[in-house]
Amino acid sequence: MEKQDIIKSFKDSLFTGLIALALFGPIVGLRTASKGEGLFITPQWGVVFLLVGLCILGRFLININSARRTEFKIFSTLSSKFSSITEGKAKHFAITGILFAVVFPFLPFTDRYFMDVAIMILTYIMLGWGLNIVVGLAGLLDLGYVAFYAVGAYSYALIATTFGWSFWICLPLAGLFAAFFGILLGFPVLRLRGDYLAIVTLGFGEIIRIILINWYEVTNGPDGITGIPRPSFFGLPFKRSPDEGEMSFHTFFGLEYSTMHRIIFLYYLILVLALITNYFTLKIRKLPVGRAWEALREDEIACKSLGVNPTNTKLTAFAIGAMFGGFAGSFFATRQAFISPESFTFIESAIIVAIVVLGGMGSQTGVVLASIFLIGITEIFRDLEQYRMIAFGGAMVLIMVFKPKGILANRKPTILMHGDKK
Amino acid sequence: MSNLLSVEKLTMKFGGLVAIDDLSFDAKNNQITSIIGPNGAGKTTVFNCLTGFYKPTTGQMYLHQADSKVSLRKYTDFKIAHVAKVARTFQNIRLFPAMSVLENLLVAQHNELMIASGYSLYGLLNLKSYRDREQQAVEKAKYWLDIIGLTHRADDNAGDLPYGDQRKLEIVRAMCIEPKLLCLDEPAAGLNPKESAELNKLLKFIKIEKKTGILLIEHDMSVVMGISDHVVVLNYGKKIFEGTADQTKNSKEVIEAYLGVDE
């Protein structure tokens, strides 16, 4: 490292400090406090100098880090090491992950809170896997994915409360409804790509939400739907005191009643649903339709010149992606027992898209890691209340700085001529 | 030699601009027909009309089959390749760069594989009939890769291949749909002399062994003169000359179109 490099980066960091001072000075430095008869400004310059100092130091370290190209790139070497480990042992990694997920509810440190977080993470993993079909494989940026989640949840809730059918009948129906809406969205956007497609899908997500709010007769508007039946264990409900002549889960198995039973059951339910989604995606990626999705993502004109029907190919991607969103929606409805349009805002779509993009487009393992990372981090920092969104944003920035193509960005061919060389 | 393709009075207007003006020509079976002309003469527009990317303003294009002729105007978009079996390549290579070489060739066999996979149902059930059909498709891909000498790179990403190999891959990918007519848009652009010679060999192979008619747009005269059976010269959307390679070389109109006229 040259001397002038140090001087240059030092100057640069001083300049950064100047900008930080201009920003933090008024925002942090001048604190307003109300004391009896009015507002007073209490300056807190100590905090300002601390923040500015941190900025200068941080900038200086980053400069040095990037100047010494080979010697000192901690983060990038770490992350590349990490991806080479997961690359070589993808299969072991997946199996260990699934085994851990299976025994998780019975680990000694697992309590109610851990289970709730795990169920939430699994729901997002399932949504991420569903959206991965649309965004990762077919390359159609869908910012309104939450619409299908909502359609699934509302179809489940309405069918279950109106007809009283069991979860296992309502689940496929909800998936079908969502798939139907996927095709409904698919038709008008067939010609659109990239940014334009993103805007229209975003609008679609909002349309669904606004319909749910305003169609009071059916959806009960902003009040939402209450009393959605809880799932039963193959006909055995999770109730403390079952009705006359009815068996409950704990009486049937002769167990002490515990609310954890239902939560563990829900956990396994979403685990199975998510694994089905994953299995299906991995399978269909290797079929002609999966290859056509990826080919369409790569070059639509070339696809047409080879006789691939882009309309059907896109619609199947939308429909199948939406179907899994619908399944996840039904699960959400039965878990919460109450749904309202508030659960299906744009931020949900954004989080799911973020999970897919940060995980590495098209990578199934990447979705898992990104879900754990993003949802987990916001949960860990829950005590910080509103500041936890900073952690969320920070996590995104970190991934984008060090892995701009996503955590796991490598794509494996769907078929090999010479077999696996590794 | 029987006709494979007849273009009759084809006109394509973009607003006030007449890109192709009353163009008629024939391409024969088992022959290489070249379309040449200065830049902007309308060559690629002819291709885009033939392959369904544009709908011509007026005129007809017929593809002759054993005992009937099919109007290409009836088909648009992907159906040209799927039903009429007219394949094409592009001036700027359009491979699927992030997919492997083998996958590129399998996408070209999409429609047959889709039926064999029972629209994904048999494929999801992993039935043997589908696995066999897929194996067959891989064999076909291998056959073509052997011909262009890329079998050892079958599992690499198409985008990682050298430029010349990408050109060749795009041509054999088009051949995987088993076309009756293969339209090549400047296949020799950016190739060095050795690669051009290889390309000539490949095109002759397709013409003789595969009995596929080839329609070729090209600026590289070593390719055009070396392999064309028939040459059509365009300028400002009009046909100004038609004949064999030797006749074209000596034609006054063609030389004028390329080099200009003495004042």
Image: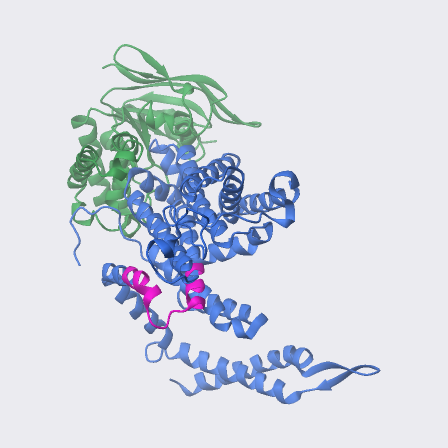
Chain colours: A blue, B green
Task: Give the percent coordinates (x, y) of residue A357.
Answer: 43, 57
Part of the protein shown in magenta: A98-120
Of the pair B227 and A3, the residue shown nearer to us: A3
Residue A104: say if magenta.
yes
Q: Magenta region, mostly helix, strand or loop? A: helix
Residue A19 sits in which quadrant?
A: bottom right
Residue pushed farthest top?
Answer: B67
- A335 to the left or right of A272: right
Task: Give the percent coordinates (x, y) of residue A204.
Answer: 56, 43
Do we see residue A19 in this rendering?
yes
Of the pair A137 and B50, the residue shown nearer to us: A137
Of the pair A180 and A22, the residue shown nearer to us: A180
Residue pushed farthest right?
Answer: A37
> Quick check: B198 above or below A91?
above
Q: Which residue is drawn at 31% across and 45% down?
A: A285
Q: Look at the image and tell me in which quarter the N terminus of chain A lies.
A: bottom left
Q: Which residue is drawn at 51% across and 71% down?
A: A391
Task: Give the percent coordinates (x, y) of residue A411.
Answer: 31, 54
Q: Look at the image and tell me in which quarter the C terminus of chain A lies.
A: bottom left
> Quick check: B50 above or below A84?
above
Residue A241: say if magenta.
no
Do we see residue A271 in this rendering?
no
- B142 to the left or right of A152: left
Of the pair A238 and A194, the residue shown nearer to us: A238
Task: Give the percent coordinates (x, y) of residue A168.
Answer: 40, 42
Residue A24 sits in which quadrant?
A: bottom right
> Quick check: A223 above or below B239?
below
Q: Which residue is drawn at 23% across and 30% down?
A: B227
